[in-house]
Image (cartoon, helix red, strand yellow):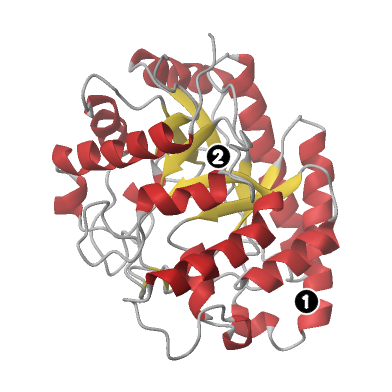
């Protein structure tokens, strides 16, 4: 049997920006992120592509067609494809004023235009446009019903715009985004949006914090007296959460978490991304990825064409070490061997 070649293995470029700048460490350049990705190799296997954050200083969302062509040539020249994109919607909260919500939708539109152009160049065979509510959980909690309705209304408008460009939107499950800060609020939001091109982006680190009820204790899955040594209870909690969210999941990040929250720079505290080799990591990355990549009967879902490593807010010294990216690639390869498939070219 040939080796599994799907899902494709991607690295995220935005960890060079997220949590950097301001009172933190300097931003790591886009070229450095690309070079480290392209140079990673484990037993002859390399990364297949990158997922891009469409925001400064890495990417100018308003770049010309010639600029996009140069970007395509740069990434393609390194033997990489492009997958999912992150829309820079944080200047317009989804439950903000009319003007702010209009800004949100416009940022989604620009991101979808950008994504369509990449597909036309043949470098982006799969992937979504990622969004979030750009709103804080405590602001959402002031009026959960009205604010969920407002977020859903904004997301529906964004979905309608995305559909014009053949794009799907995925809402990021992260405890710092109001209306998607727990697994139940996430499902409520998805159901309220009710658009065929709207789905969920699971991140193994961020969604892991759903189990502990951070920012939403009433939605905690693990018992308050849970001990990390109780792997059976953790497995049951993961089964419960993934069974509820898997039907919505259209984009997936492989990651590690040590059960704590973390934030640097301007980024709010959220599920801490740990290195794939972190001895304090609470996840069995290969095994636990299967809860997202297989259905309740153990069948591989093939719900997305690539998986991506997302590891934000690591020290620059760690991110500038090539060994870091080789270790990450090795973790992704194990996930694909366990839960992937072979597909003829």
Q: Residue at x 55, y 43 (%)?
A: 293
Q: CA distance from mark 2 to mark 1?
A: 26 Å
Q: Residue 286: horizontal and vertical position, in percent?
A: 38, 47
Q: In this image, 176 relative to 286: left or right?
A: right
**Quadrant assignment for the N terminus:** top left
Query: In the rendering, which numbered label is found on residue 85?
Result: 2
Q: Residue at x 23, y 60 (%)?
A: 25
Q: Residue placed farthest to the top in the image?
A: 345
**Which quadrant holds residue 228?**
bottom left
Q: In this image, 26 relative to 293: left or right?
A: left
Circle 2: is it few (<14), some (14-19), or many (20+) Cα within 10 Å? many
Is residue 10 among the parts visible in the rendering?
Answer: no
Image vertical order of residue 100 relative to residue 70, above or below: below
Q: Residue 46: horizontal and vertical position, in percent?
A: 30, 24
Q: Earlier in the sequence, mark 2 or mark 1?
A: 2
Q: Residue 107: horizontal and vertical position, in percent?
A: 66, 47
Q: Nearer the viewer, residue 100 or 49?
A: 49
Residue holding disc 1: 147
Q: In this image, 183 relative to 211: left or right?
A: right
**Which quadrant holds residue 75?**
top left
Q: Residue at x 53, y 81 (%)?
A: 213
Is residue 204 among the parts visible in the rendering?
Answer: yes
């Amino acid at each position: 049997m040939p080796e599994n070649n799907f899902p494709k293995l991607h690295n995220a470029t935005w960890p060079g920006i997220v949590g950097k700048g301001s009172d933190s460490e300097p931003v790591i350049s886009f070229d450095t992120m690309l070079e480290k990705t392209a140079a990673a190799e484990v037993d002859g296997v390399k990364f297949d592509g990158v997922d891009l954050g469409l925001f400064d200083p890495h990417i100018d969302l308003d770049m010309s067609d010639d600029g996009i062509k140069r970007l395509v040539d740069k990434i393609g020249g390194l033997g990489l494809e492009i997958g999912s994109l992150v829309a820079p919607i944080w200047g317009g909260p989804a439950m903000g004023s009319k003007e702010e919500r209009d800004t949100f939708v416009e940022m989604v539109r620009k991101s979808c235009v950008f994504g369509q152009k990449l597909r036309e160049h043949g470098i982006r065979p799969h992937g979504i446009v990622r969004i979030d509510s750009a709103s804080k959980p405590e602001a959402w909690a002031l009026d959960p019903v009205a604010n969920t309705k407002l977020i859903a209304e904004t997301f529906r408008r964004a979905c309608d715009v995305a559909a014009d460009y053949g794009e799907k939107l995925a809402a990021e499950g992260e405890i710092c985004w109001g209306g998607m800060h727990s697994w139940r609020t996430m499902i409520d939001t998805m159901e309220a949006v009710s658009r065929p091109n709207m789905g969920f982006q699971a991140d193994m680190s961020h969604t892991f914090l759903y189990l502990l009820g951070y920012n939403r204790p009433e939605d905690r899955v693990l018992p308050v007296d849970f001990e990390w040594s109780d792997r059976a209870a953790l497995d049951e909690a993961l089964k419960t959460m993934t069974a509820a969210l898997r039907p919505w999941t259209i984009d997936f990040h492989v990651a590690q978490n040590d059960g704590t929250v973390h934030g640097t720079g301007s980024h709010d505290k959220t599920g801490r991304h740990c290195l794939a080799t972190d001895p304090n990591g609470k996840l069995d990355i290969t095994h636990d990825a299967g809860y997202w990549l297989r259905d309740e009967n153990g069948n591989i879902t093939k719900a997305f064409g690539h998986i991506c490593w997302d590891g934000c807010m690591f020290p620059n010294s760690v991110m500038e070490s090539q060994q870091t990216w080789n270790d990450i690639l090795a973790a992704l390869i194990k996930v694909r061997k366990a839960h992937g498939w072979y597909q003829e070219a």
